Amino acid sequence: MIPEVAVLRLGHRPERDQRVTTHVGLVARAFGARRMLLAAHDPGVVRSIRDVVARWGGAFQVEGDVGWRRCLVDWKAAGGTVVHLSMYGLDLTEVIDRVRACDPVLVVVGAEKVPGEVYGLADYNVAVTHQPHSEIAGLAVFLDRLFEGRELLIEYPDAQIHVLPSERGKVALGPAEEE
């Protein structure tokens, strides 16, 4: 079973975190999640991710201005599972099989200070490693383990841009090159 996955980004500070949060969204899309929910008001990040989806394809959705507490409560009330990525959580290798059996899954990716309430609302607090690391790397590793590498083969037929694998150099086809 392949669960439906959404990513909730918490702790985004618009004046500092646009690049990191945008990368959280890009990793979520590229590694198999279906949408990203941003618990902040930052239309630039939302627009940037939507632009990538328009050019690179897929049905990935992004929504800003999401109230994180209501999002977690509603997700659970609808029968979903909440996984909070934290270096203080349980070992990924110990819980991934249980999480894989859940559907849908909301993955919470925080920044510096995650409210303590999130740890209590989460069904699983999961650590990719117990060392300081990037939330972007943690999300990528988690999704890769969750989908067992199948997400690496995703292709988007509606993409305007297609990368052609090449041993050396960059080869991409855009709308003009494909005609």
Image (cartoon, rainbow, N blue to C red):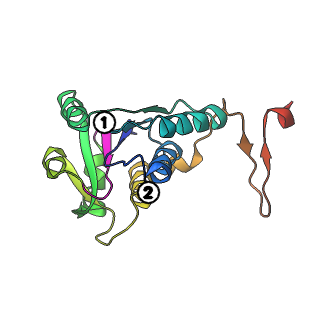
Q: What is the number of the mark on residue 54?
A: none
Residue 172 location (% of width, % of height): 77, 46
Residue denoted by label 1: 103
For disc 2, the marked residue is 136
Q: Is residue 160 left or right of residue 145?
A: right
Q: Are marks 2 and 1 in contact (CB under 8 Å)?
A: no
Name which residue lies at 58% across and 42% down. Answer: 154
Name the secondary structure under disc 2. Answer: helix
Mark 1 secondary-structure assignment: loop
Q: Quadrant of residue 3?
A: top left
Residue at the (43%, 35%) spot, across then down: 35
Q: Is residue 43 visible?
A: yes
- The amino acid type found where label 1 is placed reads Asp
Where does residue 58 sit, x and y in percent of width and height?
A: 57, 32
174 w.r.t. 128: above or below: above
Name the side, left or right, on which 35 lies relative to 88. right
Left or right of 46, for residue 111: left
Decide which of 157, 23 is in the foreground and name it. Answer: 23
Residue segment shown in magenta: 102-113
Q: Tell me what residue is drawn at x 31 percent, y 40 percent.
A: 106
